[in-house]
Amino acid sequence: TISESAPIPISSTNQTETGSASHSPVTPSSSVNVSFFTAREVSKYKDNWSSKPVSVPWPEDVLDGPDPPLIDTTRAKEQGYNFEFGCKQSLYDPTDPNSGEDGEGEHKYYQEVLLDKEHFNYLGLPIDEDPKGPTNPPGKPLIISIEKSEKKSAKKLKVLLRSKEGDDRFLIPAPRKNKRNTGLSRVDIGGGDRYLRSLFQSRPSLSSYRFFRADDDELPKELGAYETKTSGRTFKIGLIYSRPGQTSENEIFGNTQDDVSEDYEEFIDWIGDRIRLKGWRGFRGGLDVDTDTTGEYALHTTHNGCEMLFHVATMLPHSVNEPQQLEKKRHVGNDVIVIVFKEGNTPFDPIILKSHFNHIIFVVQKDQVESQKKGETHYRFAMAAMSGVPSQPPFFPYPPVLPKNGHTRHFFLSKVIRSERITLTAGEFAALMARTRGTYLRNLIGNACKRCKAPKTFFDSS
């Protein structure tokens, strides 16, 4: 525990951002002013630690490709949808198995980088809030982990800042050891003041917070669990089959496994593994794994440490006398991401999906010409996203026709996962996630303060 009798008050009114080692704070609602996620933009974050931009603008030159295109944009454009039909400046390299990953959300940064290193964990609460409430602890909590300088030659240190808006990673100048206390805090504990002073050189806005350093063996374990809970490791994805000429939601949801083609079967076997639901012990995505009420089979895969369960409409129970197929829509209609495997020359109209929960629609079709030409299956990809949903670079290359191989599968599944994660940072999802993270952080701070016997001037749990 910490023996100090008061928290470390912060004041940096005369400090500037001179010497800052990172870009401006990135929150889920921020964006960078670039037309494309180019190699030059990526190079800004080549330290592989600092947070990457969460959102960049959608491609300006929408290239529709074949005639007819995979997606009918007429009505969707009127409702503010954005589209991807391939981008000439895409960074995706089909020969590189790791191409297409931006790293955000795909790593457990605290557990993989800081947990096994010496570091400090600071609990932060706004200075102007009463230590006793109204919430306990007060709202807008922060927990900041700062890497401890182990070498005299170290110039930069890693920082992980957690707030209800999300996590932000950046670098700060490694602090120098001073013989005298500069007055930033009343007590200097293990160099804590030095680290905080360096922190505020990079983030002066944190001067509105009071901080308490929690030397607690349990907190690192809890922070690791928090990272796992909030990073999103399980995904349920809708998957529907559109036969040639189908133009309505009821027609598409009316398809069963008896109606599908060999090309469709080839596609679903490429992206996942068929599982028997009864007795399944992995991620089930809301499906019944005891009594077969949601069908006997589903599609499942693991990717980059994540579990993906596909709600395959043709595998869900079919009601002969119910044209709307509400049981199928109950599952697919609650998925953020829907993949449509389309056949024929009729473009898919995203507006026919009536669920307001379906935010991103991926449309995939076997490219018969390219497949015959190359002697192996090739798929053409396109994407539609509701208004307000941020873009998801790297974009599909142009033309968006890729071979059916492991590299393409890796890129596509990574893009699907990244699309859901980014969508959850926007609109109503963002508010819900912020409330969830805020509750987690308040609980972590409250528990740590009780274990460390934090001074009541910081947090009063009595």
Image: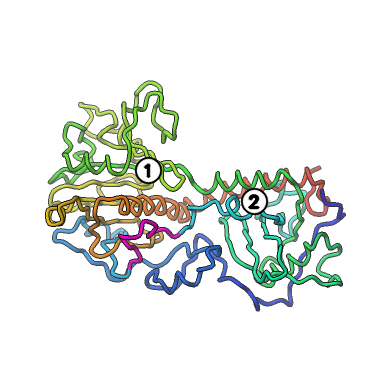
Left or right position of 308 against 199: left
Residue type at tag 2: Leu
For this view, does 134 lie left or right of residue 245? Answer: right
Task: Name the N-terminal-most of marks 2 and 1.
Answer: 2
Between 285 and 176, the residue placed more toward the observer is: 176
Residue flagged by tag 1: what amino acid is it?
Answer: Asp
Q: Which is nearer the eye, 408 or 268?
A: 408
* Label 1 sits on residue: 335
**Mark 1: secondary structure:** loop
Q: Which of the two discs, 2 and 1, sits closer to the camera?
A: 2
Indicate whether 11 appears above or below 359.
Answer: below
Secondary structure under tag 2 reads: loop
The residue labelled by disc 2 is 115
Residue drawn at the location 72% of the way across and 43% of the way down: 447
- Residue 98 or 243: which is nearer the viewer? 98
Q: Quadrant of the C terminus?
A: top right
Give me the residue at 82% from left, 65% from top. 185
Asked if residue 91 lies in the magenta stretch, the reply is yes
Q: Is residue 353 above or below residue 208?
A: above
Residue 10 placed where, x, y %? Answer: 76, 65
Mark 2–mark 1 Cα distance, whole angstroms, equals: 34 Å
Residue at 51% x, 68% y: name it.
45
Q: Residue at x 65, y 51 (%)?
A: 116
Report x, y in % for residue 34. Answer: 41, 73
Q: Which residues are magenta?
A: 90-102
Q: x, y (%) of residue 162?
A: 62, 55
Q: Main secondary structure of the magenta part?
A: loop
Residues packed near mark 1 inside 10 Å, few (<14), some (14 to 19) or many (20 plus): many
